[in-house]
Image (tube, coloured by chain):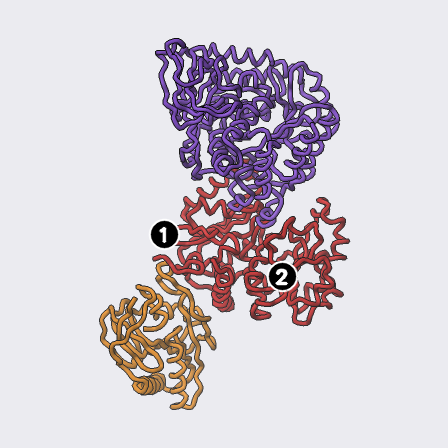
Chain colours: A purple, B orange, C red
Amino acid sequence: MSKNSNNNATNRKATVPESAGWILTGGRVVDRTGERIADVAIAPDGTIAAVGLDLDLKALGLTKAPVLDITGCVVSPGFVDIHTHLREPGREEAETIESGSRAAALGGYTAVVAMPNTEPTIDSVAVVRQVLDAGLAAGLCDVRSSASITLGREGDALSPMAELAAAGVRIFTDDGCGVQNDRLMRRALEYASGLPEPVVLAQHCEVEALSHGGHMHEGEWSSRLGIPGIPAEAEELMVFRDIALSRLTGMAVHFQHLSTKGAVALVREAKASGLNVTAEATPHHFTLTHAEVASYDPVFKVNPPLRTAEDVAAVKAGLADGTIDAIATDHAPHTDDVKEAPFDHAPCGMLGLETALALGITELVEPGVLSMTEFIAKMSWNPAAIARLDDVHGRNVEAAEPAHLVVFDPALEWAVDPSALASKSNNTPYAGRVVRGKVRHTFLCGVPTVLDGEAQR
Amino acid sequence: MAERERRLTPPYGGVFVARTRVMTADDMKRATKRMAHEIIERNQGLDDLVVIGLQTGGVPLASRLCDALELIDGTEVPVGCVDVAFYRDDIGLRPVLPETVTDIPCDLDGRTVILVDDVLFTGRTIRAALDALSDYGRARAVQLAVMVDRGHRELPIRPDYVGKNLPTRRDEAVDVTADGVDLGEMVK
Amino acid sequence: MNRPVTNPRHGRLRSLLSISDLGPDVATGISEVMTLTDSFVEVSERTIPKVPALRGRTVVSLFFEDSTRTRLSFETAAKRLSADTMNFSVSTSSVKKGESLRDTIETIEAMGVDAIVVRHASAGVPRQIAQWATSAIINAGDGWHEHPTQALLDCYTIRQRLGDITGKRIAIVGDIRHSRVARSNVAAFTALGADVTLVAPPTLLPPSLEGWPVKVSTDIDAVLPTVDVCYMLRMQRERMTEALIPTIREYSARYGLNERRAELLPDHALIMHPGPMNRGVEIDAAVADLPNTVIVDQVRNGVAVRMAVLFLLLGSGTTWGGEADV
């Protein structure tokens, strides 16, 4: 349990306005203990006052608290996205920490981990502080910062990991690319294992010698469309290497956005052999395939690329059997300007924060791949544990726990409209898609950041 | 009406339903022979004459006219055909595609062209044909022979040789085949 | 994939972005173009090879990648149809400097054009442009993807020399992987019922041939005696630096069409090449000048085929393989 993260949580309380508390009635409470119908009372101090049926509001001192009837909705610990590109500093035209936090809150997230591929790279305490401060100022979401493994994400020299960890960083990653140098990656893991804080190294698995020049998954569609491809093996080779290095160093490795059947199988095997590895998958890698690229619309350009239907099935199977611990959005905003380029010139990435819940329900829960509890585990407490945020996030819905909560209607049907999203960018690949499941309320430290689907600031 | 115009004149398509037979095959044969005589008389022989049928209805008539000319004069007259699709004034307004490849058998410079069509109606097809012919050289003269003149001209064009003058209503249709000429309507 | 584009000035039009745009039945669509091309071949042979069909229409050639031959062919075609032509040359460097593709298109369209002929080094650009534009878009080659008018002129040339393409055996030899000509030709030849064999080292084949109704061989000597058409692709020197082939010399020795190999071809077999040729690399100088080498016919037919495409899109009032909207 880290001192720093506690400090952040305490600091945040000072920035949120006073409230009379909130009462949520009739909801389906889902946390790691399972599922039950109960009312949830939120105390003015930002903690959960009580959970149960027939709460004695007088005894709780919450008679003035507004009551929200959430019958038919699920109430669960707020979601945690361990893979968010907030673009600030450097690319504020695509997203700011404020607009990204708002998108996160609307997506049901109470914590996000900002990726370090900003300009400048998050590889120094100064930039980490800038990100954390901007997150606090926005007050919509608990914004945490990752930091790069190598300086400038250039793959040559290690970032000052101890300083960064002391400033609150728990995830180190060069996301956007993988650490290509085997020896450097080994050293990074060894060095990180000696830090006082519990950190994890997360890898964007891509061997550039194989992926270089590619813009989509290499296979049937790349061949037909004449777009240079990225073979699945570019991802799998690095997964293989990092499993070996995890074994060698005894250090935890987290695999970001697994997208291939082979990569899922490697992680499954590594877990079975007792290695300390975790993995995430994105909503687009369990929803979309490379066939989407036939439109040549760069909104479908993402890294790792959209893969085959077989890979999508493997990712779903990995989610179902626990090989893949978490769903992470890889929310990657880009302005229309840069996305309206030729496919091979356009940058990679798609929005994710505001659609992840609905895609999970539509693609995983409704078809029976995951139960609602399993799904929320991968949205909330599992990623919280990976990002070492489980001291405050992904907690059970119980008295005295911090009231980081999401309330969503799992049956509400809606069509994705890019212009209606809170993100500053429009690059969602789901425009027009009808999905089910929408956030109604999000509470951060007991304060609603989203009420009735509307962001509160 | 010529097959081409039937397909291209709104309403497109439809089926021709005959009401009255206005010329029999024999009538057409006699008319063709008479027109051949008129051509020879007017041009004082067949020297430098070339017969060009308009795609598609004018083509069989052109070849029959040539046969008639040869029978009378003993001279073989070159015969060709022209498709005016690329010269029409309604390109882009209605479906226009050539039926066949234009075939002009000789250089038209200094020659007299007998342009042959089955039905003369608005005159627009003939206007297009005159433009087309000018791309093959500067003919000394162009004369127009039609089996049926049904009136309703929209351009200052008149035929030199006519098989039959047939007063019609604008909404009627005229169908020329080897069997004869029928007056009727297009039915959708 | 057939996305109709509406132009308020001329009713309904469609764009030609790939061979599959030629209608639900590609073979019928190609035949329609072939028939119309016959008429334009006749026009091209006249003393005055020009018709007024597209008077008042404007055709813009928008070439993001240099290709003098294709641009000249399209411009000649447009001029022979009496269309006005504009040339919007964009150097690749200015695109890289951040010029937005969409801005370029919107600028051109604001001038009131009817068709845009697009060549781009990136696959899919014509399709992207067609989403933003109201004019007809004609793909004049996009990256490794397609070059549909090249395939149409190749089909026409084969038909002119050998008749019906159905059942013809066609070998496409060389760098299939990076070839837009190969992709369009495979689509067109197989739609017409030809029996297509790709001959190339595995490094120069697409990574996956799933859904390609073709045979594959690495032995050109075994394939040549069986074919009606031997279609040679251009070999680019940079393939060597990408380690796709060891040396150009080795490539020529294994896959080049030299005089000995040309002897293996049946007497009637055609030798084709999309140009520009690398004499001495994929084709020997002497072979390029054989009577059965129809490269000049391909170029000549290119103008007539492009006239047919322009006329179908802008003048005929018809839509590919279907009835016109009035």
What's the CA distance linking mark 1 and mark 2? 41 Å
Disc 2 residue type (three-letter)? Val
Chain letter of disc 2? C
In the displayed structure, A152 sits above or below A50; it is below
Q: Nearer the viewer, residue A384 or C267?
A: A384
Of the image marks 1 and 2, the number of the one nearer the N terminus: 1
Where's the N terminus of chain B, which quadrant? Answer: bottom left
Q: Kindly identify which numbered label has been placed on residue C196.
A: 2
Horizontal and vertical percent position of residue A327 = 55, 30
Residue wearing tag 1? C9
State left or right for residue B119 relative to residue C263. left
| Residue A383 appears in the rendering | yes
Quarter of the figure that contains the C terminus of chain B:
bottom left
Give whichever of C271, C304 is nearer the camera.
C271
Q: Amino acid at mark 1?
A: Arg
Q: Residue furthest front?
A: A54
Mark 2 Cα within 10 Å, few/some/many (few <14, many 20+)?
Answer: many
Q: Disc 1: which chain?
A: C
Q: Nearer the viewer, residue A400 or A340?
A: A400
Q: Which percent across, then down, holds residue A319?
A: 58, 34
Of the two numbered discs 1 and 2 in the rendering, the one whose residue sits closer to the viewer: 2
- The label shown at residue C241 is none
Give the side of residue A262 with respect to residue C8, left or right: right
Query: Are the residues under marks 1 and 2 on the same chain?
Result: yes
At x 62% / y 63%, what residue is drawn?
Answer: C195
Instruction: Tell me if residue B147 comes above or below residue B155 in the rendering.
Output: below
